[in-house]
């Protein structure tokens, strides 16, 4: 392979690089805003939500899915021009969003519109793959597209919110982005690939994804209209997922780190939803705000863990490296869980020190991952 052309030789490489750089850059800017060092043209919370949903998780998801979705569907790999176009749209949109957040709201409008265009473009690509697939059963592909369709809705609502300043639109955009886009998409992939990687044969539960989606949708409706019992639907979703995952009988205790990090991620989803239910109930009883603890349990416990797990696996597996995890990467896997712990402490204590520790650990995680794996993604370095 011609090394100078390596960076764009596979879809996951440019998107993973974008995602990890954004994870560092956007979080540093958010911390500086929290400390009062810089001022955004939008609110810090909106910057934080939008940048994580579309600037960090979306590139990683696109890198994984543009590589594997054709394989799922038994069609040829994507032509380079397709994913390079997608990369150009998303990276341009995020760059304009970043510049606009610091200097001009007009650039936020243009940037968020380009990001929306990247999501629509992705959906068109997925649909073309779906239509061309010779497979008789495409349940998982359908739900991946449902997830990305929800991402389009979230991106559109954010765009409308930036134009109008409507709080209810922003609230809807954030919740749809986190639960119906990121979580449903990650679950659609996870419930397919994690048992497969674990050599566990299961009878696919075709009701699982539509049930969880419906429960998430009900939660969002109740939450947006400030009906106090919305958390009940997340609690039920957690129980449904927990019962399903228990049936899989994943060999967590006997698995290698490259596998147990994915087991840990999928375990986190029902745990985080159930804990969210209890935390929300406690907020009502004690009349105390726990600073988005439920959302962060999902974002950090499930989504960040699965992102690091799948990102590491794909980076190694598609670069000719052995699927072997060294001590440094194993430490990073543990660090994902330490971050969840400190973010929960921040929610319950409100201590600025806990916030600082959480952000610092996040930065350490992604900087260390970048140092280890960016040479693999950019130039195809052999590390084992």
Image: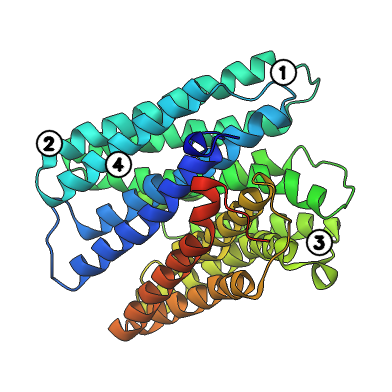
Q: Position of residue 152 (x, y in %)?
A: 42, 32
Q: In this view of the protein, which residue sits in the foreground, 351 or 1?
A: 1
Rendered view: 83 above or below 382:
above
Q: Position of residue 54 (x, y in %)?
A: 39, 44
Q: Residue at x 65, y 20 (%)?
A: 130
What element does badge 3 sit on? helix
First of labels 2, 4 by sequence position: 4
Disc 3 from disc 2: Cα separation: 49 Å
Residue 274 located left or right of residue 323: left
Disc 3 from disc 4: Cα separation: 39 Å
The residue wearing badge 1 is 133
Image disc number at residue 246: 3
User: Is the N terminus in the top left, top right, bottom left or bottom right quadrant?
Assistant: top right
Q: In this view of the protein, which residue sits in the foreground, 154 or 33?
A: 33
Marks 3, 4: nearer the viewer = 4
Note whether residue 256 is visible: yes
Label 3 packing within 10 angstroms: few (<14), some (14-19), many (20+):
few
Residue 80 located left or right of residue 175: right
Disc 3 from disc 1: Cα separation: 32 Å
Q: Position of residue 320 (x, y in %)?
A: 69, 47
Q: Residue at x 34, y 53 (%)?
A: 49
Residue 170 located left or right of residue 39: right
Rendered view: 266 above or below 173:
below
Image disc number at residue 106: 2
The count of marks equals 4
The residue wearing badge 4 is 94
Label 2 packing within 10 angstroms: few (<14), some (14-19), many (20+):
some
């Amino acid at each position: 392979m011609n090394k100078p052309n390596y960076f764009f030789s596979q879809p996951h490489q440019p998107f993973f690089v974008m995602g990890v750089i954004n994870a560092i850059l956007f979080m540093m800017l958010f911390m500086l805003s929290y400390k009062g060092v810089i001022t955004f043209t939008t609110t810090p919370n909106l910057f934080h939500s939008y940048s994580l949903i579309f600037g960090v998780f979306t590139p990683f998801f696109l890198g994984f899915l543009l590589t594997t979705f054709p394989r799922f569907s038994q069609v040829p790999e994507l032509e380079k021009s397709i994913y390079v176009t997608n990369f150009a749209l998303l990276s341009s949109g995020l760059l304009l969003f970043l510049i606009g957040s610091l200097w001009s709201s007009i650039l936020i409008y243009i940037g968020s519109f380009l990001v929306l265009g990247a999501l629509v473009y992705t959906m068109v690509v997925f649909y073309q793959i779906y239509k061309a697939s010779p497979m008789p059963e495409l349940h998982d592909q359908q739900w991946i597209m449902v997830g990305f369709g929800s991402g389009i809705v979230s991106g559109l609502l954010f765009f409308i919110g930036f134009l109008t300043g409507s709080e209810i639109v922003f609230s809807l955009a954030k919740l749809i982005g986190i639960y119906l886009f990121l979580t449903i998409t990650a679950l659609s992939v996870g419930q397919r690939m994690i048992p497969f990687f674990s050599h566990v044969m299961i009878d696919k539960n075709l009701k699982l994804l539509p049930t969880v989606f419906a429960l998430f949708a009900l939660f969002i409706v109740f939450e947006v209209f400030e009906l106090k019992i919305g958390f009940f639907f997340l609690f039920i979703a957690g129980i449904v997922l927990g019962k399903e995952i228990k049936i899989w009988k994943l060999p967590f205790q006997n698995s290698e780190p490259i596998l147990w990090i994915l087991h840990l991620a999928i375990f986190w989803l029902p745990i985080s939803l159930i804990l969210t239910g209890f935390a929300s109930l406690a907020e009502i009883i004690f009349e105390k705000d726990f600073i988005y603890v439920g959302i962060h349990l999902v974002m950090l416990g499930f989504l960040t863990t699965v992102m690091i797990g799948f990102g590491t696996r794909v980076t190694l597996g598609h670069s000719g490296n052995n699927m072997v995890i060294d001590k440094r990467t194993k430490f990073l896997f543990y660090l994902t869980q330490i971050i969840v712990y400190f973010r929960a402490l921040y929610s319950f204590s409100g201590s600025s020190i806990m916030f600082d520790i959480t952000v610092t650990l996040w930065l350490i995680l992604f900087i260390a991952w970048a140092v280890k794996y960016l040479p693999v993604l950019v130039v195809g370095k052999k590390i084992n």
